[in-house]
Image: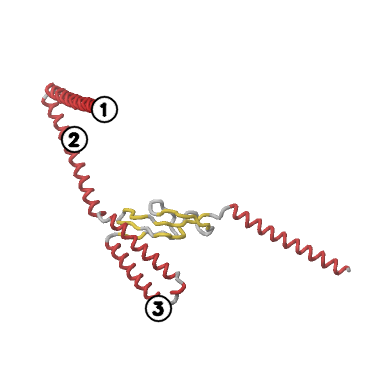
Amino acid sequence: MEKEQNQKQNNNNSETDDKSLEDEKKEKNQEEKNQEEKIKELTPEEKINTLEDKLARTLAEMENQRRRFEKEKDDAFDYGGFSFAREALKLIDNLERSKQSLENDESLKNTDALNKTLEHFNIINKDLISIFEKNDIKSIDAINKKLDPNLHQAMMEIEDDQKEPGTIIQEIQKGFLMKNRLLRPSLVGVSKKTDEKHEKNEENQEKNEIKKWLIELVDWKITHIWTKGN
């Protein structure tokens, strides 16, 4: 029974689809007939104007398609290696992490082996950067710049009253541009003003220290006077 009901349902759906297609064809044919009738009713000058308008629209659409094709072709040429370049940046990151790990190893500090290894790391890093630059991939300036959301991504805020709020004072991960397109943003830490609570705590601490000093001074004077009097 279920199979028969499903079959009937499928037949009904197909019939509905066929009817909708037929209705669309009928509407389209009717529109074409109406347009033909309108054209027949037009004067020769109006027919020429109508054809000129259709021709202008067709040419405009062809020009738009040509521009889209040219843009897609240029993008493919300029940014065809975009994904590869973004993955290649991981090589620079891994080199930097390895370098920091070796530099922080107490057993290797001030050894010839460490110095030679770091020297090779620096050569490899310079070669990679040189290859990137030849392909119009450049690092983003970050330190001491005002935060630009289009280029930088703030990861933390650092209290610093010497800098304007929002100034980049730490670079966690270097960002890169490929031509004018962002390959990846710089991960940075930005400055912020010292919190008022923190300032008040410091101020209260200073006041408490002054009070303590004054109390000790008064106690000392009282003790000194009392001792001298006795």
Indicate the position of residue 102 as horizontal and vertical percent values: 41, 70
Residue type at numbered disc 1: Glu
Q: Nearer the viewer, mark 2 or mark 3?
A: 3
What residue is disc 2 on?
Answer: 57
The residue lying at 17 percent from left, 36 percent from top is 58
122 horizontally vs 51: left or right: right
Q: Which residue is mark 3?
A: 112
Q: CA distance from mark 3 to mark 1?
A: 82 Å
Whole-percent x and y of residue 126?
33, 68
Q: Secondary structure at mark 2?
A: helix
What amino acid is labelled 3 in the image?
Answer: Asp
Total labels drawn: 3
Q: Quadrant of residue 16?
A: top left
Name the residue beneath numbered marker 1: 2
> Does residue 185 appear left or right of residue 204 in this picture?
left
Question: Could you tell me which residue is drawn at 52 percent across and 59 percent down?
Answer: 162
User: Decide: marks 1, 2 in contact (CB < 8 A)?
Assistant: no
